Image (cartoon, helix red, strand yellow):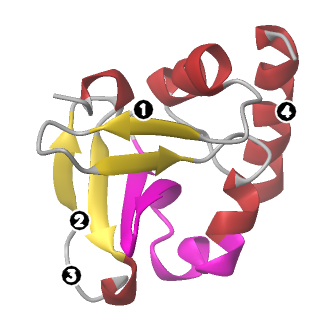
Amino acid sequence: MDKNSILNEIKLIEKKHGIKLPGKYKEFLSEEVMDKDFYEIERGNGDFVYIFNYKDVSERNETYNIQKIESDYFLIGQDGDLGYFVYLKDNDNKIYSLDLGALGSLDMDEEAKDLYDLSS
């Protein structure tokens, strides 16, 4: 699937959830992840983050009720029980993380300025 087709799919995701995703996230999803079944980023500490593709990202947010518990965030990936999120306000491209069991009870941790920086 080409970049424009994926961007169109992302627009449908935004409409479905009533959200506006950050520009760098949409760029990364359409240019790097594309329609791959999985996409892994190796962190500087050796951990791997699984970034969801456009086909799976809605289902993962629905599974964890993200928009009901953390309505300002959108789950974009995981490393075990650690969720990785984008913030949906102010076109913030930063990546945040939080243990999925702690949703709604703890503040998110800032991980990187954007997905391209997450491997640092």
Query: Along the horizontal axis of the image, is 81 left or right of 17?
Result: left
How far is the residue under mark 3 from the one under mark 2?
7 Å
77 inside magenta stretch: yes
| Labels 1 and 2 touching (C-beta < 8 A) | no
In the rendered image, residue 74, in percent from the top left (x then y), is placed at 52, 56
In the structure shown, which secondary structural element does the residue marked by tag 2 occupy? loop
Residue occupied by mark 2: 108
Residue farthest to the left? 45
In the rendered image, residue 56, in percent from the top left (x then y), is placed at 74, 53
| Labels 3 and 2 touching (C-beta < 8 A) | yes
In the rendered image, residue 104, in percent from the top left (x then y), is placed at 35, 85
Residue 91's disc is 1
Tell me how many marks there are.
Answer: 4
Q: Which residue is at 31% across, 43% downward?
A: 95
Residue occupied by mark 4: 9
Observer-nearest of 88 and 74: 74
The answer to whether residue 88 is visible is no
In the structure shown, which secondary structural element does the residue marked by tag 4 occupy? helix
| Labels 3 and 1 touching (C-beta < 8 A) | no
The three-letter amino acid code for the residue at tag 4 is: Glu
Residue occupied by mark 3: 106
The picture quadrant where one finds residue 8 is top right
* Position above or below: 103 against 89: below
| Labels 1 and 4 touching (C-beta < 8 A) | no
65 inside magenta stretch: yes
Q: Nearer the viewer, mark 1 or mark 4?
A: 4
The three-letter amino acid code for the residue at tag 1 is: Asn
Question: In the rendered structure, which segment of residues is drawn in magenta?
Answer: 62-89
Q: Residues within 10 Å of mark 1 (few under 14, many from 20)?
A: some
* Position above or below: 22 against 110: above
| Labels 3 and 4 touching (C-beta < 8 A) | no
